[in-house]
Amino acid sequence: MNKFDNAYKTIGEVVKILDLKAKKGKSSPTHTIRFWEKEFKQIRPKIFNGNRRYYDKKNIELLKKIHFLLKEQGMTLNGVKKILDKKEFLKLDETLNHSIKAQELKLKIENISKLINNLKK
């Protein structure tokens, strides 16, 4: 781990870390992070002159969890709030995330295969 890993990140850098994208005709991805700050009291960036936000490693990990639960797992804001309020440690396991996606894909393929077999009959 180098020194840069522990450095504060700007909101723009956090957007890149989370790989947030702006939808056509919608607000910028930085707006998403600002919205999450209002919704989740656990996110506390350092705000310096000119209202510039700086996020430490702890806040970035929390934002990663929120992003994962909302975007990857399809949870609601209230569902994520309940998890975060319980203060249970939620480990983001990249391999687990990929295996969940693989299982979902496998189920979809099986369902499509059944539909094709039924159509052939």
Image (cartoon, rainbow, N blue to C red):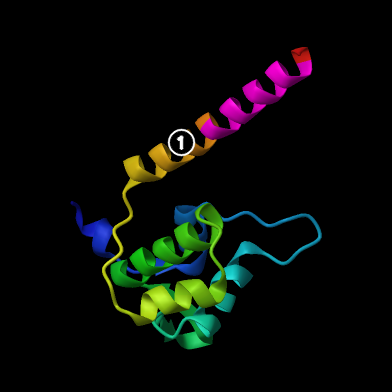
Check the picture and name the quadrant holding the C terminus: top right
- Magenta-highlighted stretch: main secondary structure? helix
On the image, numbered disc 1 is attached to which residue?
A: 103
Percent position of residue 5, x then y: 26, 57
Q: Nearer the viewer, residue 19 or 91?
A: 91
Q: Nearer the viewer, residue 70 or 8?
A: 70
Q: Is residue 36 magenta?
A: no
Q: Is residue 115 magenta?
A: yes
Q: Is residue 87 left or right of residue 110?
A: left
Q: Is residue 104 above or below residue 1?
A: above
Which element is circle 1 on? helix
Q: Nearer the viewer, residue 117 or 35?
A: 117
Percent position of residue 118, x then y: 72, 20
**Residue occupying image coordinates x 37% and y 66%:** 60
**Residue occupying image coordinates x 44% and y 54%:** 17
Q: Is residue 18 above or below residue 110?
A: below
Tell me which amino acid carries mark 1: Gln
Magenta-tinted stretch: 107-119
Percent position of residue 19, x then y: 52, 51
